[in-house]
Amino acid sequence: MKSIGRIAASVGLVVLLAFGVVLSGVMQTGCDSEGGPSSEAGAASPADSPAAPATGEPAKPADGTPRLLDLGSKECIPCKMMAPILEELKAEYAGRFQVDFIDVWLPENKEAATAYGIRVIPTQVFFAPDGKELWRHEGFLGKEEILAKWKELGYVFSASASGPNDR
């Protein structure tokens, strides 16, 4: 009887680990632009030139601040996980950098996916105040990773009142 219990526990552990591997794979790779898990790696791709803006979507922020653009979907699991992070950043860093989201699975936003060359969602694109694309990432990106990337790019932000290191 004890051996049956051990086997059941082992099978349960294997199933749990398999689920974790699958979930982490989706988080790292994101979803493809057609609506399913992607086989693309979640690695960043360097930005050699400014991204083309979507119709009616300015690449250069109106207020002259850096901009984080997240292209994803409200239906994609990694995108859903990023939504509260983007809202936090938008609230905490208002006036320091702009945070925008485009749901590229909506028919009216398909042009944005094409204009920005989106292969995998979510994709985050970091823009300088002049609209030049600085860096992009495919897949889930956490709040601390986003802030660390801004710092690496030379932008130091504080969530409190503007200080001498804020840009």
Image (cartoon, grey):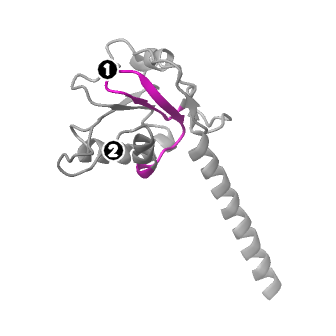
Quadrant (top left/top right/bottom left/bottom right) for the N terminus:
bottom right
Mark 2 Cα shell of 10 Å, populated few (<14), some (14-19), many (≥20): some
Which numbered tag is attached to residue 128? Answer: none
The amino acid pointed to by label 1 is Lys
Identify whether 82 is placed above or below 100: below
User: Percent position (x, y) of residue 133?
Assistant: 44, 24
Across the whole image, how many numbered discs are drawn on residues? 2
User: Percent position (x, y) of residue 3?
Assistant: 82, 84
Residue under the image location 41 percent in, 28 percent down: 103
- Asked whether 121 or 130 is in front, the reply is 130
Identify whether 71 is placed above or below 82: above
Identify whether 97 is placed above or below 143: above
Say whether residue 113 is left or right of residue 58. Answer: right
Q: Earlier in the sequence, mark 2 or mark 1?
A: 1
User: Percent position (x, y) of residue 13?
Assistant: 70, 69
The amino acid pointed to by label 2 is Val
Quadrant (top left/top right/bottom left/bottom right) for the C terminus:
top left
Say whether residue 96 is left or right of residue 114. Answer: left
- Asked whether 6 or 43 is in front, the reply is 43
Which numbered tag is attached to residue 60? Answer: 1
Q: Is residue 92 visible in this depiction of the protein? A: yes
Q: Residue furthest bottom?
A: 2
Q: Does the magenta portion include 146?
A: no
Q: Does the magenta portion include 136?
A: yes
Circle 2 sits on which residue?
156
Residue 134, picture quadrant: top left
